Amino acid sequence: MTMDKLRIERAVHEILAAIGEDPEREELRETPKRVAEACEAIFSGVGDDPARYLEEAFEGDHRDLILIRDIPLYSMCEHHLVPMVGKAHVGYVPDGKVIGLSEIVNIVEAYARRPQIQERLTAQIADLLFDGLGSRGSMVVIEAEQLCMTLLGSQKPGSVTVTSASRGVFEEDGGKRAEFTTLMRPPG
Ligand SMILES: [Zn+2]
């Protein structure tokens, strides 16, 4: 998807003027252009269908939990367009189909790089790995600092919001959830 960068530039110019800044000030002159370029990276997931990464799935008889922990996560809260920064732990139990670890990272990124809320982001990843991939179950835990809450004063800096979503065997079996949470913590 291509973005209307000129339109973003005009809008940022307008915001700078509206907050009482001088958009023509030397140091700010290139800012609208830079923000437009940043938007292309930050919102690269808009219009992207993460299900396309499932096409890389392959047959495999692994029937135990596969977990990737500490996937770096950068997203934008859709209420304030302020970053949330943290990490995602993503696991699933295959049912004949296995997906590469880099594809899981791509799925997380595609859902994260768009205006989001943490709860939906967590659920979307879990749903895709359960319904989309056709697994026995999936579980996702996201730990992130919502910078809007910090900036706007409702939370202390460094406070972390944790969300989780479990599907299939993880929803039905507390033991499976416990296995996930044990493995997502580094030992020690
Ligand atoms: Zn927010």
Image: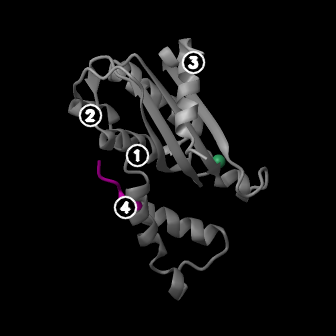
User: What numbered label is drawn on residue 175?
Assistant: 3
The CA distance from mark 2 to mark 3 is: 32 Å
The residue labelled by disc 4 is 5
Front residue of this view, candidates 141 and 69: 69
Comes first in the chain, label 1 or label 2: 2
Q: Residues within 10 Å of mark 1 (few under 14, many from 20)?
A: many
Q: Residue drawn 27% across and 18% down? A: 96
Comes first in the chain, label 2 or label 3: 2
Front residue of this view, candidates 168 and 16: 168
Q: Magenta segment, which residues?
A: 1-7
The CA distance from mark 1 to mark 2 is: 13 Å
State the image quarter where residue 125 is shown. top left
Q: Point out residue 22 in the picture as x, y percentages from the top left corner.
A: 60, 80
Q: Residue drawn 77% across and 51% down? A: 155
In the orientation shown, which residue stands out farthest toward the bottom?
A: 26
Query: Which residue type does callout 4 highlight?
Result: Lys
User: What numbered label is drawn on residue 52?
Assistant: 2
Query: Which residue type does callout 2 highlight?
Result: Arg
